[in-house]
Amino acid sequence: MRLSPWLVCAGALFFASSGNCEPFYPFNAADFVVPPDELDAAAIGEAAVHSGFRPLSESDPKLRALRVAADPVYEIWELPSHKVATITLTMLRKTNAFLVMFVSKEPSRNGSSLSGEACKKWLSFSAAMRSEFRNRQSKFKFRNPQCTP
């Protein structure tokens, strides 16, 4: 049986293009629904630190590059091991509000929710956020439902 050159080229293109897909990293977020202030940023930082995350150094190249973006990053927190997840606090210029992103470092299926250790850390962080904003929980809403570890 002889394969036509057209079929061989089509198969090669199919396999080559499927390897270039960007990986999906599960996440959850907290969208602030009112303009933020410095106390909000401090409360988010306290929640991150309470969950075991540490702020990146001001000299970190990743933080410095993201501070000059269209929507500048206010702060980034990572675990001391630099594994599991990253928390990013961004000021959205269009809405003048904060966006808190919690992104897993483990790639997963497109559209999947946080799982495993990332889910446990998210639950710890989101509980700490609720505690920090005890009297002001109407200031933000979580984007996705809570995960189950």
Image (cartoon, rainbow, N blue to C red):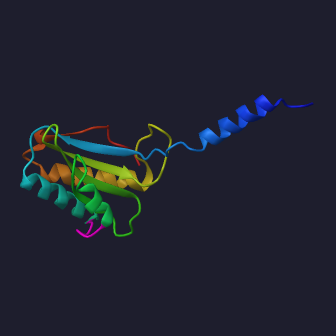
- Determine the residue positioned at 31% across, 50% down: 102
Q: Does 56 lie within the magenta span?
A: yes
Q: Which of 21 and 130 is in front in this view?
A: 21
Q: Position of residue 121 (x, y in %)?
A: 34, 56
What secondary structure is the stretch in magenta mostly built from?
loop
Magenta span: 55-60
Quadrant of the frame with the N terminus: top right
- Spot the residue most to the right: 1
Q: Nearer the viewer, residue 134 or 37?
A: 37
- Determine the residue positioned at 22% across, 52% down: 89
Q: Where is residue 108 in the image (x, y as percent from the top left)?
A: 49, 46
Which quarter of the figure has residue 39? Answer: bottom left
Which quarter of the figure has residue 118? Answer: bottom left
In this rendering, would 93 be left or right of 135? right
Q: Position of residue 72 (x, y in %)?
A: 21, 51
The mark total stands at: 0
Q: Where is residue 10 in the image (x, y as percent from the top left)?
A: 71, 32
Q: Does 124 lie within the magenta span?
A: no
Q: Which of 13 and 101 is in front in this view?
A: 13
In this rendering, would 142 be left or right of 34? right
